[in-house]
Amino acid sequence: MSVKENLRQVRGSIPEGVELVAVSKFHPVEALQEAYDEGQRVFGESRANELVAKAKVMPVDVKWHFIGHLQTNKVRQILPYVSLVHSVDSEKLLRLIDSESVRAGKVTDVLLQLHVAKEETKFGFAPEELTELSATGIFSELTGVNVIGVMGMASNVDDENRIRDDFREIRRTFDSLGASAFDGKDDFRVVSMGMSHDWHIAVEEGGNMIRIGTSIFGEREY
Ligand SMILES: *Cc1c(COP(=O)(O)O)cnc(C)c1O
């Protein structure tokens, strides 16, 4: 099936209120353009150079989301193009995006990446780390970053219960932050979880932003 058909099918099956990030990493701009022509505006990329290269040639109203591990030496490079960074996985990175944004005279929307899966990525905050960090008052202190939610991935396993537990933990952490550090902050509202193979479960467990690559663009060739 074509990108257009795939996109239509995915769109047709996601509930209202769930935002779709089309994960276009490793796919050529022609494929992105096809999705764009079908109305898609939010694209997810995981490498800084690739995001910048694509942003330079794609229409300017695309919203670029950075979803991969962000190296500190790439922050300045992507800031002019990125509309949301999903993958803030350390205090150091958070502070750097803040200072670079202030320097550029902008405020950058970010999500805090949680690490709940038992294996897979080593990146992200453990839920209790985030609770401790938020107690320091850092989130109200920083003026160059606007924390609008959390992002996470489930364990890469077949056991649906394990996956569901991971998504529940991400949602629970979001709710707990929303009732503490971000209490009363209306734009703290994004729970980014779910990929091609597990987004149904993520949405059932309270995810409201899903990151879909393969089901739209096909398999990636690394
Ligand atoms: C690649 C990637 C996705 C998309 O994965 P698919 O299985 O192709 O849908 C989602 N989230 C992150 C963080 C990714 O790196």
Image (cartoon, rainbow, N blue to C red):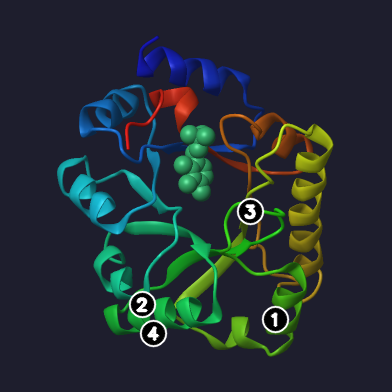
Q: Residue at x 23, y 48 (%)?
A: 55
Does the residue at mark 2 contact the one at mark 4 (Cβ under 8 Å)? yes
Q: Earlier in the sequence, mark 1 or mark 2?
A: 2
Ranked by sequence position, the earlier of labels 4 and 1 is 4
Q: Which is more toward the observer, 219 or 143?
A: 219
Instruction: Estimate the spatial distance between the alpha carbons at disc 2 and disc 4, rounded to whole Å.
Output: 5 Å
Task: Identify which residue, 66 or 164, lies in the foreground.
Answer: 164
Q: Are marks 1 and 2 in contact (CB under 8 Å)?
A: no
Quick one: label 2, few (<14), some, or many (20+) residues within 10 Å?
Answer: many
What amino acid is labelled 2 in the image? Ser
Q: Secondary structure at mark 1?
A: helix
Tell me where residue 45 appears, x and y as whole percent. Answer: 37, 47
Query: Nearer the N terminus, badge 1 or badge 3?
Result: 1
SS of the residue at dot 4?
Answer: helix
Distance of mark 4 from mark 1, alpha carbons? Answer: 18 Å
**Mark 1, residue position:** 134
Whether residues under marks 4 and 1 lie with C-beta atoms below 8 angstroms apart, the answer is: no
